[in-house]
Amino acid sequence: MESILQIENLTKSYGDRLLFGDITFGVNEGDKIGIIAKNGTGKSTLLKILCNKEDYDSGNIIYRQDVRVGFLEQTPELNPNKTVLEVCMENYNSNEDDVWDYENRMKQTLSQLKITDFNQKISELSGGQLKRVALSKIIIKKCDLIILDEPTNHLDIDIIEWLEGYLSRNKVTLLMVTHDRYFLDKVCNKIIEIDQQTIYTYQGNYNYYLEKRQERIEAQTAEIEKARNLYRTELEWIRRQPQARGTKAKYRIDAFYELKEVANKRINENNVQLNVKSSYIGSKIFEAINVKKRFGDKIILNEFNYNFSRYEKLGIVGSNGVGKSTFIKLLLGITTPDSGYFDIGETVSFGYYSQEGMQFDESMKVIDAVTKIAEIVVFDEKTKYTASQFLNLFLFSPADQQKFIYKLSGGEKRRLYLATILMKKPNFLILDEPTNDLDIITLEILEEYLSKFNGCVIIISHDRFFMDKTVDHLFIFEGNGIIKDFPGNYSEYREWYVLKEKEKESKNKVTKSIAPQCKRDNSNKMTFKEKKEFEALEKEIETLTNEKNRIEEIFQTGASPEEMLKLSSRYAEIKDSLDEKELRWLELSEKDN
């Protein structure tokens, strides 16, 4: 396959901190590559370097000539003063793109990503809407290479599944960083792992990577163990031969130092050790009694009643804006219900992890942020940690603890935030989008911790894999105050939902096939009103067709970008109107005059 991008001996560091050194890999046409690495090893930095948004120390980046690259950043930067339509038209090139095809692609893609108000200002969009507009812009552009940095963050699950299907079906070349393991498994045909400044490539999806990575670790472990045994033997020889000067002896001494390097190597599996305990929780957790909440015409809860059980693990799913986070804030007392109340047990101690809750003084050091909360973390008589020991459990080495918070990566800050929540010994964890910015290894350890957590859990997440591993049942927020309780994880719910939709579709087909027979009209003659409509349609179709032809002539001869944008919008309106009127004209033409 033809090479699109070649990276050779690329090195990047910040001061004395090396992110990656001398890494080399290529991207060929048709590759769908997922990049996996621990937080703080420079995944996002690598993508920015490839898109010329950040400098690097040394190495070569070679793109195929005239390659079109689309880059989705974690937090897209779009002109806040422009409308959705104007931003998406920025990529339009009259020399390369057919205006009708481009506009049709643009509106279709925006609609599929649930962006319907094309004239809305970018400044008025939510974070999720902003991400979807930026994503639409890349898809419309028809890029040779799409580079995505955490594309699933802030997206609803149904949008993630749409994007998953689009990237899987289409012959796009893809390079991305994501923590979404289902997404990696279904989309990628190649995984690149950055581990200890070295590149490992796996020709397969995420499941294949897991299998082969384990084989690699086992082989490396065996090699290191073998080297250590031989090193001990050679060390004894070296000690007995301090004056050796012969050629053979010198060769053996040189080999000894190479062997020593291998023997001292570590398979760095620095997992977050979340072996912290929760405080005691009683049998009464909380009861929701006739809770109502609305914002204007928007209903969040409507006489909601529920009795939460001890050790219950609940997942909450639903589209953005249906009230998932508001429900949590009502439970925590951050937001007040319009009527009704939550009766919370006396032993309940909440630990709330939220997107907006991570607020640190960035000028502080990591260790100071923790000692500010507690210098000694006491879980029981047998389990006590100093602040430094506690941070070690979360992969912050003594050197890392002395770093200023502003120097941490997004994932490292999230890990620190999680540490500050768990050190308070909550027995009821509420996690609102906890997976954003956490690396896969941290997620796996957090999943393991939650499975053994001796307390209650509520999770709002778009990460399907994470939900499947951690919750017992789901609240499905459908909007308008409708909440359905599903007894199972997300995959089980999705399977049930798809089956239900197929059954509904099947019933609709049967109804449609029967309906014409039941509603057959004996008369097939035009009414007086229909004759007048038919005559008017002929004139309207002629007028619209003439206007359409005039706009097409302008497109051929050229126009200013402002005029092109205005005419493109009018052209789409004419096409829609013509389709509608011509369909009605055909219906009427089949009747007798």
Image (cartoon, grey):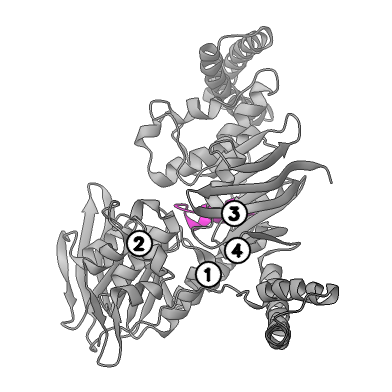
Mark 1 or 3, nearer chain start: 3
Q: Amino acid at mark 4?
A: Gln
Q: CA distance from mark 4 to mark 2?
A: 21 Å
Asked if the stretch drawn in magenta spans residue 101, the answer is: no
Magenta stretch bounds:
151-164
Query: Residue 14, how many percent across, how many down?
Result: 49, 48
Q: Is residue 523 visible?
A: no
Q: In the rendered view, would you say 270 is above or below 324?
A: below
Mark earlier in primary sequence (1, 4): 4
Which of the 4 image quarters holds residue 350?
bottom left
Write down the residue under mark 3: 20
Crowdedness near tag 4: few (<14), some (14–19) or many (≥20) residues, C-alpha within 10 Å: some
Kindly identify the amino acid type of the residue bearing the numbered disc 2.
Gln
Secondary structure under the numbered disc 3 in the rendered image: strand
Q: Nearer the viewer, residue 152 or 506?
A: 152
Task: Name the residue tied to disc 4.
Answer: 196
209, 380: nearer the viewer: 380
Q: Secondary structure at mark 4?
A: loop
User: Label 1: which residue?
Assistant: 441
Query: Dot 2 corresponds to which residue?
Result: 402
Give the structural element (helix, strand or loop) at label 1.
helix
